[in-house]
Amino acid sequence: MIVEDDPKIAGHLHTFIEKYGYDVLNADDFENLMDSFRRFRPDLVLLDINLPRFDGFYWCRQIRLESICPVIFISARTGEMDQVMALENGGDDFITKPFHSDVVMAKIRSQLRRAYGEYAAGNKERILQKDGLKLLPERLELRFGTAEVTLTKKEADIIESLMDRHPRVAGREDLLEKLWDDQMYVDENTLNVNMTRVRKKFQELGITGAVETVRGAGYRLHVTWNGAEEL
């Protein structure tokens, strides 16, 4: 996915990358970028910094709430602080304009190898399973039988914690620390809102009563379906 508001640069990158057999999307809605991201579900994003309304740093943070796909910043900014901010806001690499197309392609291939190929950690996808419930955290997917839902990054982290702790209780403080360890203060309702979203995802799979609230302690995975089975 290419996020570049200069049509000449975006068109050149699209044509060049497509020659190597990749499916390429050029973003054109710079106010609702995440809508395009969710539809296309890219394996990698090329992201400019200077964009209409919100800059690339903002959009990288939004992407990181939902995905761990590689993000390569590509910008005319050459200052060291810009590169530092790109990495601090969730980017994986930085390319300065003007650029050589072969260098861009080499960096794309390098990031794809690191994320999904021969250099990926363990070179094996993690899959968590509990009696038919299957979580694929790298894909941000939750499956049960033939049903499947897409998760945000925080939803996947919460479900992973619940599955890891089962049948024990996942404490509120532990969940907050894992999910928001980079924030000085988190409103007490933030976790409640995210747990509501997690419960809705289980309901979409036809699973009722998935998350039990343990008063004063936290949450426990307590999944039933068809009134017959329980995790």
Image: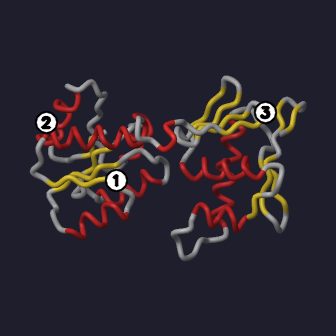
| Label 1: which secondary element | loop
Alpha carbon separation for disc pair 1 and 3: 36 Å
- The tag on residue 131 is 3
Is residue 72 found left or right of 11 in the rendered image? right
Mark 2 or 3: in front is 3
Separation of disc 1 and disc 2 at Cα?
A: 22 Å
Report the side of 31 relative to 139 (left or right). left
Asked whether disc 1 touches disc 2, contact meaning CB atoms under 8 Å apart, the reply is no
- Looking at the image, is mark 1 or mark 2 earlier in the sequence? 2
Residue occupied by mark 2: 12
Q: In the image, is 179 to the left or to the right of 17?
A: right
For the N terminus, which image quadrant?
top left
Residue 191 location, quadrant: bottom right
Kind of residue at disc 1? Asp
Residue at image point 72% right, 38% down: 203
1 or 2: mark nearer the eye: 1
135 w.r.t. 158: above or below: above
Disc nearer the start of the sequence (2/3): 2
